């Protein structure tokens, strides 16, 4: 399973076996069950998580008890509460498992050690952060400017595999629409 991480790293940088073994030694492997929390609001966030298998969601619950999905995570994706991770503070969001999941956990301390020891890994993380920032900006712009059908079509085009793994009510929450609206968007006549 660690080959998934190596493949992702090698999309950005070249790494030899010794270097990869060193990188991998800074991660811990952990398995989570469906519905189990990986991060809970109010807890200290110590890790960034690379997903080896499974599916997760990050979300916050507003003062009225409504759940707002911020992101999903699937195999070969990273997920955490980045504000809390980088600031070594308490989570403001929750992350839990939509299905049984296996994660590689990278503590902030170990990430810093890796970046100091291997410039190419620092470069890898910088490139990943840049891509995440661009994706986040695109998501915000889509939420602000696209109608429900456009948001749905964009998500389907970018991540068709999500629709196989994620229940429709969670997709609706992510898009900021009701379950009924999502059903209309998903109907063959649309």
Image (cartoon, rainbow, N blue to C red):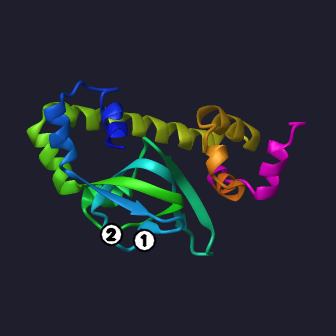
Q: Quadrant of the N terminus?
A: top left
- 179 in magenta: yes
Q: Tell which of 168 and 10 is nearer to you.
A: 10
Q: Quadrant of residue 38?
A: bottom left
Q: Residue furthest right?
A: 189
- Relative side of 55 to 43, left or right: right
Q: Quadrant of the C terminus?
A: top right
- Relative side of 55 to 2, left or right: right
Residue assigned mark 1: 41
- Relative side of 107 to 151, left or right: left
Q: Is residue 27 above or below residue 91?
A: above
Residue assigned mark 2: 90
- Relative side of 138 to 110, left or right: right
How far is the residue under mark 1 from the one under mark 2?
7 Å
Q: Residue at x 38, y 58 (%)?
A: 81
Secondary structure, mark 1, is: loop
Q: Is residue 18 above or below residue 96?
A: above
Q: Tell which of 121 and 69 is nearer to you.
A: 121
Q: Is residue 129 in view?
A: no
Q: Which residues are magenta?
A: 174-190
- Residue 53 position, x and y percent, is 46, 49
Counting other residues with Cα less than 10 Å from the Cα at mark 1, is it few (<14), some (14-19), or many (20 or more)?
Answer: some
Q: Residue at x 33, y 69 (%)?
A: 90
Q: Is residue 171 in view?
A: yes
């Amino acid at each position: 399973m660690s080959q998934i991480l190596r493949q992702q790293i090698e999309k950005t940088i070249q790494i030899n076996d010794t270097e990869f073994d060193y990188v991998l030694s800074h991660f811990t492997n952990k398995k989570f069950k469906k519905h189990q929390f990986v991060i809970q609001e109010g807890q200290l966030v110590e890790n960034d998580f690379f997903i080896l298998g499974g599916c997760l969601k990050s979300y916050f619950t507003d003062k009225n008890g409504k759940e707002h999905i911020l992101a999903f995570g699937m195999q070969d994706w990273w997920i955490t509460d980045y504000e809390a991770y980088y600031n070594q503070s308490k989570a403001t969001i929750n992350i839990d498992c939509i299905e049984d999941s296996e994660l590689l956990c990278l503590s902030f301390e170990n990430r810093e050690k890796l970046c100091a020891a291997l410039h190419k890994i620092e470069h890898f993380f910088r490139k990943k952060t840049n891509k995440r920032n661009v994706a986040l900006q695109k998501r915000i712009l889509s939420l602000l400017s696209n109608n429900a059908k456009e948001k749905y079509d964009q998500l389907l085009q970018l991540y068709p595999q999500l629709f196989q793994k994620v229940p429709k009510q969670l997709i609706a929450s992510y898009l900021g629409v009701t379950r009924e609206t999502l059903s209309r968007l998903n109907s063959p006549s649309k």
